[in-house]
Amino acid sequence: MHFEEIKKVLQTKTIGIAGCGGLGSNCAVALARTGVGKLIIADFDVVEESNLNRQYYFQHQIGHKKVESLKANIKLINPNAQVEAHHIRLDETSIVKIYKNCDVVVEAFDTSEMKLLIIETMAEGLPNKPLVLGVGMAGWGDNNSIKCRNHEHLYICGDEEKEITEDLPPLAPRVGIVANMQANTVLEILLGSV
Amino acid sequence: MAISITLNNREETFDTDLLNIDQLLKMKNYTFKMMVVKINGKLVKRPQYAEAQIKEGDDVMILHLISGG
């Protein structure tokens, strides 16, 4: 497939991004660059200085809503990408409501509690929709432990092992690898295997 | 008697007559705080781990959820 053909297919697709931190901001940007037609992003947070070690924001955006800042950054890269931004703390009701018309949903939360919430919520409320998870990306190095596996509608990207601690912070390279792996998985779902 | 299942895309056999999720977790030494369990694609929530029986040939997925993102 030529890039023009790829963009033609992707133009018609809508991807949900649940959380706009390290995973969500980098994954959304990768999908916008590739030509996905519409992104539905949601996050309750504002940009903090400590986020800039891995998240797709800039100094002048500190204190601003993440969803509005990410929308602005995406528009600078690809003005044709539609971005629907929700400044909201996602829960069982809003997850189903916001993402019900998406082709694929990307889970990009930081806490394991929220990861569980979206898996359980979508299993009940959006049972056939593909959900791409990011699980395990703290620290640095150990490239070969990062992988992707698939179980029906669930796609799991990450090392499934390294939890964030004070000695194992989330850093741009590994978070970026998993975020881009999630974006790559979305493309595989939408375009089929190469 | 033994029960053969697919666990996380891998064939595994357990020397037992009856197997539920609680027993499976114990046999695998899984002590995860946050996890997702599916039997043949169907989500099993934590309160049902003791009653959710796993049968010969079942496809079981166990995912350990960890923080970070």
Image (cartoon, rainbow, N blue to C red):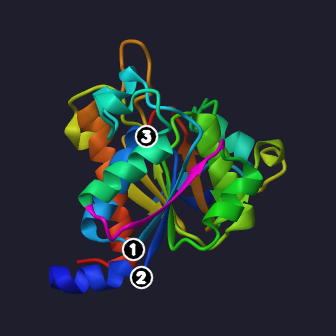
| Mark 3: amino acid | Glu
Residue at the image position 62 percent from the left and 40 percent from the top: A114
Question: Of the residues under marks 3 and 2, which one precedes in the sequence?
Answer: 2
Q: Which residue is mark 2?
A: A12
Q: Secondary structure at mark 1?
A: loop
| Mark 2: amino acid | Thr
Q: Seen in the image, is A96 located left or right of residue A22? A: right
Q: Which residue is mark 1?
A: A37
Question: Of the residues under marks 1 and 3, which one precedes in the sequence?
Answer: 1
Q: CA–CA distance between discs 1 and 3?
A: 31 Å
Residue at the image position 42 percent from the left and 34 percent from the top: A161
- The tally of labels here is 3
Q: Secondary structure at mark 2?
A: loop
Q: Residues within 10 Å of mark 3 (few under 14, many from 20)?
A: many
Depicted A45 relative to depicted A146: above or below: above
| Mark 1: amino acid | Gly
Output the chain of dot 1.
A
The verdict on residue A80 being magenta is: yes
Q: Which residue is mark 3?
A: A160
Confirm or deny contact between disc 1 and disc 3 (CB under 8 A).
no
Name the residue at the top extreme.
A166
Q: Seen in the image, is A94 located left or right of residue A174? A: right
Depicted A21 relative to depicted A5: above or below: above
Q: Secondary structure at mark 3?
A: loop
Confirm or deny contact between disc 3 and disc 2 (CB under 8 A).
no
- Residue extent of the magenta highlight: A78-89
